Image (cartoon, rainbow, N blue to C red):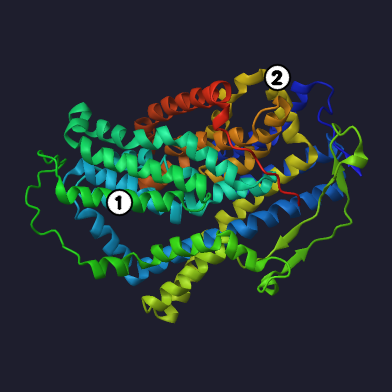
Amino acid sequence: MWFQNYDPLNNIWLSAFVAALPIFCFLLCLIAFKLKGYQAGFLTVLLSAILAVFVYDMPAQLVGASFVQGFTNGMWPIAWIIVAAIFLYKLSVKSGSFEVIKQSVVSITPDHRIQVILIGFCFGSFLEGAIGFGGPVAITAALLVGLGLKPLYAAGLCLIANTAPVAFGAVGIPITAMADLVGVEQHAIAAMIGRLLFPLSLTIPFFIVFLMNGFKGIVETFPAILVTSLSFSVTQFVTSNHIGAELPDITSAVVSLLCTTIFLKMWQPKHIFRLDDKTDFSSEVQLDAKTLLKAWTPFLLLIAFIVLWTSPWFQSLFAKGSILEFTQVTVQFNDSVGSIMSPDVVDPTQSHPVKISQVVNLIAFQAGTAIFVAALCTIAILKIKREDALECYWATVKEMALPIITIGLVVAFASIAKNSGMSTTLGKALASTGEGFAFFSPIIGWCGVVISGSDTSANLLFGPLQQATAKTLGMSEALFLAANAVGGVVGKMISPQSIAIACAAVGLVGKESDLFKFTFKYSIAFIIIIGAWVLSVALFFPNIIPDVIHIVK
């Protein structure tokens, strides 16, 4: 048994400074030294291990086991979800379905304002929910340039539009990964994020139209934009509160696309706003229902299987003693490395120590498995050749190898920081700000995404810190964990990785600083508003915060 020491230097702020050094290391490696993500992750893990051993007196064997614990969590189920989702997307592209999907969105209206909402906001949200990791901005920005928007303008608008769905991106992996790391059930976090995001999701479409055409544009397109905003934000809220973290982006995007499309069949703006000189739209392709249904098949299957896989009655089929129990394969790492105990425990015999070992449950109802089954069904239904399907799969594995390793290292660092007590040290120091920490909670997530380019990475880096601070203050873990994710969504638009991806997609390599200037002021304004919103919830609306269920591992 090893007891943690939250103040090894006998000064909480000095101890907190030392505990924050790995985070500073990660930021410096990415910003100042321009290292790759996996390189920055490796150096961060190395520094955190050294501090854990020589400052926190953590036995080296426990540090090594913590690394295994964290890295394994990064590989499974996180990597499995990412690979399965991008594999499905590549199958859609290979079959030609994705091109039809793009045409179906473009053919709805010739008005550039509404096209940006449909493609940058709705379709981008759909892609964010399905694949995430920079792909949505690249695809939607390139598509808007093809429709007549200037490259810088298209990239900037897509970065802003991408804010609302980021928290639930890549089939909810930012939330599910953080929930697993901090040992809480994901539904409370997902529900809280849906509640915090509702005002932002409702506002973003109007804000985009305002940037394009001022108040005049909002007035001219108000009915259509209202339909989009309401259908998207309400569906996102309902899905996140009643289903979970995996589907809010996909369901809200599909519902808003359908509602807006149906509405635009009955109503069009009197003045067609264009940023080019095009006036003849008679050549637009008209797609029949059968073609559209076939094109959307991969993602309709994704929705169906995720809903099935997350249904309690379906999951019960895999429980111990049930018919599909045989599909569970458990990999147990060495359990003899020891365990830790919090120094706050008054009577150790009445508390369960945290064992630094790893149990990997290769259960068949993992979300990644649901997506992979959807991909297999897509291959069969769209009659994709076996060699083409294998090509898509191996291309996915090759493209995601380094990002997955980076995520594994980030989770490994978070595991070491949590088990050594470093995260709690930071939490206790920040807790001295009292209830005012609620304002800074989303700003921490914002900083994490600005630097790492990923809400998943930011949640894994700072989730344990947010949890530790919440416990110290006696406030809701769900609120602070959700605030970290929500703050991160508006950091995405100025993240160097996001800026680079957007510029590359529209042919503006070398113009990254111009795009950064376009989005920076909006990101700052949004994060201040979100900080004030989270503080208001903590102080005046605590009843809207759901209860957290802890998972005993």
Q: Secondary structure at mark 2?
A: helix
Q: Which residue is denoted by mark 1 in the rendering?
A: 257
Q: Are marks 2 and 1 in contact (CB under 8 Å)?
A: no
Say which amino acid is labelled 2: Ser
Q: Quadrant of residue 520?
A: top left
Residue 413, x across and y down, in percent: 70, 45
Residue 336, x across and y down, in percent: 89, 56
Q: Earlier in the sequence, mark 2 or mark 1?
A: 1
Q: Quadrant of residue 312?
A: bottom right
Q: Residue at x 15, y 41 (%)?
A: 274
* Disc on res. 432: 2
Say which amino acid is labelled 1: Leu
- Pick the residue in front: 254 or 107: 254
- Pick the residue in front: 151 or 550: 550
Residue 260, x across and y down, in percent: 25, 48
50 with respect to 110 (left or right): right
